[in-house]
Image (cartoon, rainbow, N blue to C red):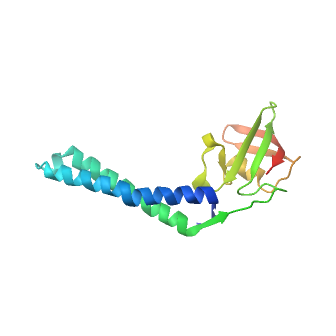
Amino acid sequence: MNNPLYLTAEGYKKLEEELEYLRTVKREEVARRLHEALAEGGELIENAEYEAAKNEQAFVEGRIQELEYLLSNARVVENPPTDHVDVGSKVTVVYEDGSEETYTVVGAAEASPREGLISNESPLGQALMGRRVGDEAEVEAPDGTFRVKIIKVA
């Protein structure tokens, strides 16, 4: 990967907690489901519960590997600058229609637009990076280009 994997301290902690949950609780649940499905007997090919449990096991193990990779390669961002937008910054913008939104710029692994966490790699995140209060940014989004003005960086 070319881009560093940025995580806020809070995001790092959340991913650590998810990894711990998957390693302990979820793995055990899936193992129990597999054991119960095998105990039912019959042909494994025709055992829908067994197939579902195997699929879930593959998902859980894949997610564990993904989280281990993210956590071992992450750059944790603490104390982001307040004079310009960077990963970890909380930034308030005004759109052309006058509406205001506040976002926290995070790494792609932590992004959740519904929660106000935008990726530094997203069109809006890229447009905001490095800018200061009072700057305007042109955002080239899939739906078209728009402008925002930065009114606060924290």
Q: Quadrant of residue 115?
A: top right
Left or right: where does residue 39 sit relative to residue 15? left
Question: In the image, residue 104 lies at what x, y percent?
Answer: 70, 49
Specify the farthest residue to the bottom: 72
| 23 lies above or below 99 | below
Left or right: where does residue 112 sit relative to residue 57? right
Question: In the image, residue 45 lies at what x, y percent?
Answer: 17, 49
Q: Is residue 63 visible?
A: no
Question: In the image, residue 127 lies at what x, y percent?
Answer: 76, 50
Q: Measuring 22% from the left and 49% from the top, which residue is drawn there?
A: 50
Question: In the image, residue 152 lies at what x, y percent?
Answer: 83, 46
Q: Measuring 49% from the left and 57% from the top, which residue is drawn there?
A: 17
| 52 lies above or below 58 | above
Q: Is residue 64 visible?
A: yes
Q: Measuring 39% from the left and 61% from the top, which residue is drawn there?
A: 23
Left or right: where does residue 101 sit relative to residue 111? right
Q: Quadrant of residue 98?
A: top right
How many discs mark residues in the rendered view? 0
148 and 36: which is toward the camera: 36
Question: In which quadrant of the rendered image does the N terminus lie?
Answer: bottom right
120 and 77: which is toward the camera: 77
Specify the farthest residue to the left: 42
Q: Measuring 61% from the left and 50% from the top, which residue is drawn there?
A: 111
Q: Quadrant of residue 88?
A: bottom right
118 and 89: which is toward the camera: 89
Specify the farthest residue to the right: 134
